[in-house]
Image (cartoon, rainbow, N blue to C red):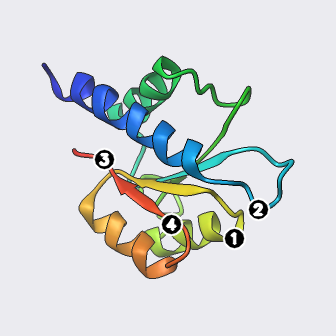
Amino acid sequence: MDRRDFITLLGGPAVASAAGAMRSPAGDRGRRIGVLGNAPGPSQDSLTEGLRAVGLIDGQNIAVEWRWGAGRPEQRRPELAAAELVRLPVDVIVTISHRVARIAREATTTIPDLSLPQ
């Protein structure tokens, strides 16, 4: 089993479970997952595939907010990307590295986070 299959197998159901367990404070806005990472990559595709495998499709029955802390021309800091997710607000924050998991935990104590393996 390669890394992508592992993340898909583990990540999709874990995020689906976390998002499904959350009750939306705004009632009608639907579920929203925030994803915080360093830069887009294979983890993004794997997470999307994992969510789809459990029936969660971005733009249809769930909203996925992707935020990257690096990899853009302006080199956004992960702290700023985490703060954006908190302001939206999202129901859960999925992190794609231990470093950004720590940053997400510093940004909020009220939104649960889930760190995916790399």
Residue 67, how many percent across, how many down?
Answer: 54, 54
**SS type, badge 2:** loop
Can residue 12 be seen by looking at this rendering? yes
* Rendered residue at 52%/68% (across/down): 82
- The residue wearing badge 4 is 76
Q: Calculate the distance from the C-alpha at mark 3 to the C-alpha at mark 2.
A: 25 Å
Residue 109 lies, in percent from the top left, at 49, 79
User: Pointer 2: residues within 10 angstroms few (<14), some, or many (20+)?
Assistant: few
Q: Of helix, strand and loop, which one carries label 1?
A: helix
Observer-nearest residue: 5 or 27? 27
CA distance separating discs 1 and 3: 22 Å
The CA distance from mark 1 to mark 4 is 16 Å
Q: Amino acid at mark 2?
A: Pro
What's the residue at 38%, 55% (across, down)? 114
Q: In the rendered structure, which amino acid carries the disc numbered 4?
A: Arg
Asked if the residues shown at circle 3 and circle 4 are in contact, with their CB atoms under 8 angstroms apart, the answer is: no
Of the numbered discs 3 and 4, the one sitting upstream in the chain is: 4
Element assignment for label 3: loop
Q: CA distance from mark 1 to mark 2?
A: 14 Å
Q: Which mark is residue 70?
A: none
Residue at the (29%, 34%) spot, across then down: 10
Query: Which residue occupies the foreground of this view, 108 or 13?
Result: 13
Residue to which mark 3 is pinned: 116
